[in-house]
Image (cartoon, helix red, strand yellow):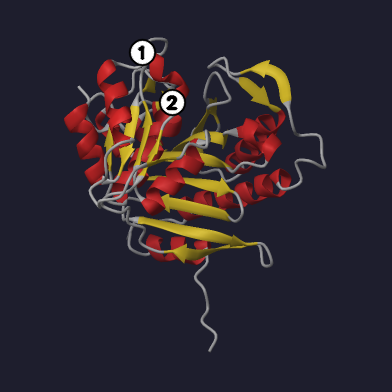
């Protein structure tokens, strides 16, 4: 017997009905954001056939090489989100300053248009990260004030994963009909996992307690009695997606050269932390949830540890 799948649009509309003061603007914003990511997905899948691979020859505000696909993805998202008339301000990792879009817009959108973009050259999964706040409260809000956050992972299948503060749900793109369909309802991160994800190339620059902690994972078992395995893609969306679904721990710590870490609080850390905490996981930045940090600038960086509750608790015990 045929069972009709739930589309992302239907799901968002159903969530909206729970709010008596809803006007439909937020639903429009999310559905158009999803539309933009479908365009990005289409171009990524043809990256070897069109001239969007490789460096653009420029650097962004963080001195990272800007890929051609970064510029394309940023333009698509800015254009489509601006056209909704719902957005007051768009802040992008690819832009030095936020774009003031509409003085009457109700929302602020922070975004990393294409996380891990250099990986497109070698067919590794990449993604789009987004975070939404109410515009009336200003640009520099705590992560706990997000009204929605999510990511889209472009891989063997494309998934739209998001939360509006009522749990986390995942939708897989069915390319035959062009719709994201509910495939992972009520995602809950496992209590423990056997995977740790960190760039160990930086280990000589870490604090000794962190070095010792990572070394201990290679010779001990997790809370489930399983040996740990190292898994690191180098695309935050990919590493977080795996951690969310299978458990474990993800770390991007500070080091001697990056005393504040390398990941951006508003573009990467806050949205991913909101998702992980809504899925029952834990997050830490300098000993507290990053969602409690009042940002000092739109490009602020912080260290981050997140994942399964048992794994993060183990980290807390061993790293000082």
Classify residue 128 by image quadrant.
Answer: top right
Q: Position of residue 285 (x, y in %)?
A: 28, 27
Total tally of numbered discs in the picture: 2
- Which quadrant holds the C terminus? top left
Badge 2 marks a residue whose secondary structure is: helix
Q: Is residue 28 left or right of residue 164?
A: right
Find disc 1 in the rendering and name its residue.
259
**Which residue is label 2 attached to?**
200
Answer above or below: position of 200 versus 105.
above
**Kind of element beneath mark 1:** loop
**Which residue is outermost to the left?**
317
Q: Residue 135: where, in percent of width, then height?
A: 40, 35
Q: Nearer the viewer, residue 275 or 214?
A: 214
**Left or right of 198 on screen, residue 42:** right
What residue is shown at x 57% (from left), y 33% (from top)? 116
Which numbered circle lies on residue 270? none
Across and down, in percent, residue 251 comes to 37, 31
Identity of the residue drawn at 46% across and 41% down? 239
In the rendered view, tell whether residue 262 sits above or below residue 39.
above
**Where on the picture, by quarter, is residue 311?**
top left
The residues bearing labels 2 and 1 have C-alpha atoms spaced at a distance of 16 Å
Q: Residue at x 20, y 29 (%)?
A: 318
Residue 105 seen from this side = no
Q: Residues within 10 Å of mark 1 (few under 14, many from 20)?
A: few
Percent across and percent down for residue 56 are 73, 22
Residue at 45% in and 47% down: 241
Q: Nearer the viewer, mark 2 or mark 1?
A: 2
């Amino acid at each position: 017997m045929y069972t009709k799948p739930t589309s992302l649009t239907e799901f968002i509309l159903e969530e909206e009905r729970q709010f008596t003061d809803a006007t439909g603007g937020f639903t429009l914003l999310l559905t158009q954001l999803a539309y933009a990511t479908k365009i990005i997905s289409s171009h990524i899948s043809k990256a070897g056939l069109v001239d969007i691979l490789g460096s653009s020859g420029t650097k962004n505000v963080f001195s990272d090489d800007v890929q051609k696909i970064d510029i394309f993805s940023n333009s698509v998202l800015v254009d489509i989100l601006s056209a909704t008339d719902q957005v007051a301000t768009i802040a992008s990792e690819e832009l030095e300053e936020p774009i003031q879009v509409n003085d009457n817009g109700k929302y602020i959108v922070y975004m990393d248009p294409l996380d891990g973009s250099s990986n497109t050259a070698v067919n590794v999964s990449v993604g789009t990260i987004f975070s939404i706040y109410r515009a009336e409260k200003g640009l520099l809000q705590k992560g706990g004030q997000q009204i929605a956050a999510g990511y889209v992972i472009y891989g063997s299948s494309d998934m739209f994963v998001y939360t509006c503060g009522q749990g986390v749900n995942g939708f897989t793109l069915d390319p035959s009909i062009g719709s994201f369909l509910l495939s992972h309802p009520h995602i809950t991160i496992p209590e423990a996992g056997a995977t740790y994800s960190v760039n160990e190339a930086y280990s000589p620059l870490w604090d000794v307690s962190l070095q010792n902690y990572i070394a201990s994972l290679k010779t001990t078992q997790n809370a489930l009695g399983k040996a740990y395995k190292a898994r690191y893609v180098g695309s935050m969306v990919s590493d977080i997606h795996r951690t969310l679904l299978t458990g474990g721990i993800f770390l991007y710590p500070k080091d001697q050269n990056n005393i504040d870490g390398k990941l951006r609080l508003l573009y990467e850390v806050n949205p991913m932390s909101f998702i992980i905490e809504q899925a029952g996981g834990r997050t830490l930045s300098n000993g507290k949830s990053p969602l409690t940090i009042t940002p000092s600038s739109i490009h602020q960086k912080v260290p981050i540890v997140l994942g399964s509750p048992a794994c993060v608790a183990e980290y807390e015990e061993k790293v000082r």
